[in-house]
Amino acid sequence: MIIDNAPIHLNLEDIHVGYPGEKSGEWNSVVRGLTMRLQHGRIGCLLGPSGCGKSTVLRAICGFEPISAGEITIDNQVVSSKDVTLAPEKRRIGVVFQDYALFPHLTNAQNVAFGLRDLSKKEALHKAEEWLERVGLKNVGDRYPHELSGGQQQRVALARAMAPEPELLLLDEPFSNLDVDLRERLAGEVRDILKANNATALLVTHDQFEAFAIADDIGVMVDGRLVQWDSAYNLYHRPATRFVADFVGYGVFVPGTTQAGPSVDIELGRLPLPQSSYGLPGEAVDVLLRADDIIHDDDSPLQAKVISKAFRGGDFLYTLALDSGQPIMAMVPSHHDHAIGEKIGIKLVADHVVTFSKS
């Protein structure tokens, strides 16, 4: 998503990655025709389920995987194509791995200084201490990784990757070993660190909330293809495909019929449609209803039965059934603690109506 005149720092143009199969002439595609552009100083994210090819894209950018077609450029230099493969160590890329990959026999400062081979030992350790302080870990340089928490170890790994001042920072599922609360908090902290240093970074994750917390631009991948590269807001409110709509956020598809206006009728009532998503009157469609499109209202004549609920601290995520049996979801403040099987009043407040043709 290009939003200003900042130069393109990372450009992937129609790249393909795969490997030969067991049979002669067989080819197994992992990444298929992926194109994306990341501007200098922005944080991008490839988001998708396991096996969609996102980590393979990261490995191709690093130079660990050759590409069979297309082109990868970093700061206008071709680093990968069908005929060119620049060695990984010459790409000026820093990588933060899922398992931190810290050396247990080295102190934290020595871990950060490990890649600063152009400096003297004294200079490297001094710079390492500076970077540890930048990531909020002052006075831990003489300690060892095992003496730190998981979140602190991840910040040491981040400092080590950034200390050589790489052209590009890649983060491969960096928070997946942490508990949920720490994961989101650390993602926000990492974003602040990257922004403070004007770093260009690309993250891969299967966790949408992690992606929302850290990234400026997010690309949703499925089956080796990038189906939408956009802001978190647009992925949530303007999904380009049914897969994106289903994968991002909490929601369900409910049947509807388009009307003149333009509008669409669903079981809960009539909703206005943007002109861009309007088809012919009488067309059967599926309407995406997010959990925040349904609010709890004791005075509403519309009723729905509580089928299940998940406590999320400040909210309950309720799964409700309409009179027809059609399930919907609602995010309700947690002081409204309703029992399974209870009927509650609801109100439809959808502002961003998204429809898809019947599958």
Image: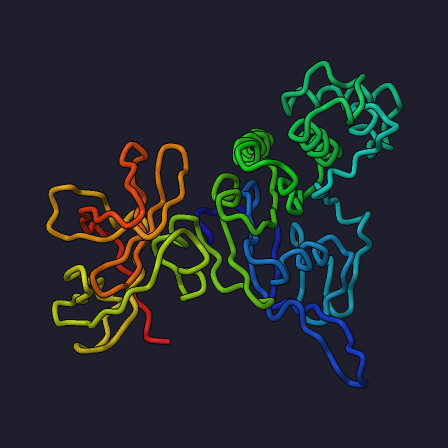
Quarter of image, res 296: top left
Q: Nearer the viewer, residue 254 or 36?
A: 254
Q: Residue furthest top?
A: 139
Q: Quadrant of the C terminus?
A: bottom left
Residue drawn at the location 64% of the way across and 25% of the way down? 135
Residue drawn at the location 19% of the way across and 67% of the way down? 264
Eyeballing the image, is 231 above or below 285? above
The reply, left or right, for residue 249 in relation to residue 306 is right
Eyeballing the image, is 205 above or below 316? below
Quarter of image, res 157: top right
Residue drawn at the location 70% of the way across and 68% of the way down? 17
The reply, left or right, for residue 259 in relation to residue 71 is left
In the rendering, at what x and y percent does residue 319 appear?
A: 33, 52
Residue drawn at the location 29% of the way across and 40% of the way down? 332
In the rendering, at what x and y percent does residue 198 appear?
A: 58, 34
Q: Residue furthest bottom?
A: 24
In the rendering, at what x and y percent does residue 34 appear?
A: 59, 65
Question: What is the basis of the colouring in this image?
Answer: rainbow
In the rendering, at what x and y percent does residue 113 appear?
A: 81, 28
Quarter of image, res 133: top right
Eyeballing the image, is 161 above or below 107? below
